Image (spheres, rainbow, N blue to C red):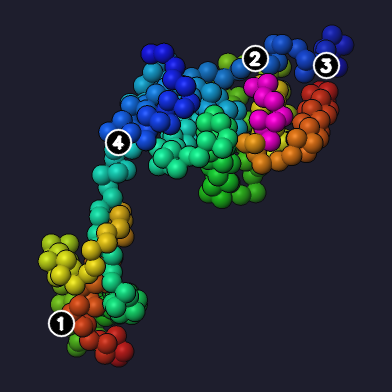
Amino acid sequence: MPDWEDREIIEGFNIPGNEEIAFNQLVVQYQERLYWHIRKMVISHDDADDVLQNTMIKVWRSLNSFRAESGLYTWLYRIATNEALSFLKQKKKKAFAPWVDMEEQMFEKMEADPWFNGDEIQLKLQEAILKLPEKQRIVFNMKYFDHMKYEDMSEILGTSVGALKASYHHAVKKIETLLDKD
Amino acid sequence: MNMDHKKPDLQQETLRRNPFKVPEGYFESFSDQLHERIKQEESSKVPVRRIGTTTRWMALAAAMLAAALITTSIIRLSSPRDTEGLLPDLAVLEQMQLLEDDRFLYEILTEEESVELDENEAFVSQAIEYLAINDVEMDLIFE
């Protein structure tokens, strides 16, 4: 199935009776990118699946009010980011043992996770990333793994380019320090 | 300490590789799973009539009344010594059980605008309307 232009997806969704076809096209085109962005934040595949579904359901309910002031992907990314952050917040609230560090728990699960395919160094890197504050973690993942431009990140996160650059710089320094400890 | 151990360099391309994987066929079947879920969520929403403005204050009072009635009835039912006054409370509870089947009164007395509520919200909304319409006695809760 060839990709549709964003404009075609939005126009298609606004044609009565055509919503499902347009939405299905959107899902097929964007599911992987959104999934990997979410997965890097929540780590577990099952959690990423939940969050991606929640994201797409939100998109389904609000696509007809999308104003195209930002690009479609930016808008989708923002929804996915917020859903992942909400999910992590809820998870922390529901934690049976609130005194246990959630990020540490996530790392321990990752070590044993059959859907983690990394080597020892990659595992250390993920451990270091999990120790970053949430926003720094998002910024680092978007820049380091997704090679996203600061201007696009600024639109998605609602933060200035300068603040994002500072955030990324601090994240890199912290990770380098953590990786150096051995 | 292992002297051969190199400090990982963030610029290494190998570090930038995605260390996560997904179950086989996940993305191929995601769209179908998503559509199933959307269908389920949308079919669990029950459209009901919005309560008119003229009965809104009664609806609020009736909601408090219903909560107090249920609490009182439960306390009475679990208390062995007091058998008086059980019949009216049970009758009200029985009436509430019939609410889901009796929509005729709501259609006459409520406005045309409809609101989508999920099943629980729909039931409570209808219960409140029914109690308001049937002028449930206030003194049943003040004993």
* Viewport quadrant of the C terminus of chain B: bottom left
At label 1, the amino acid type is Leu
* Viewport quadrant of the N terminus of chain B: top right
Can the viewer see residue A68 in this picture?
yes
Q: Which residue is mark 2?
A: B17
CA gap between label 1 and label 4 equals 54 Å
The x, y position of residue B64, in whole percent, is: 34, 77
* Chain to which mark 3 belongs: B
Lower sequence index among marks 1 and 2? 2
Label 1 or label 2, whichever lies nearer to me, is 2
- Mark number, residue B7: 3
What residue is rendered at 30% in x and 54% in y? Answer: B116
Tell me if residue B117 comes above or below residue A139 in the rendering. Answer: below
Range of the magenta residues? A146-154
Crowding at mark 2 (Cα within 10 Å: few <14, some 14-19, many 20+): few
Instruction: Tell me, yes or no, whether dots 3 and 1 are on the same chain.
Output: yes
At label 2, the amino acid type is Arg
Can the viewer see residue A174 in this picture?
no
- Mark number, residue B87: 1
The x, y position of residue B87, in whole percent, is: 15, 82
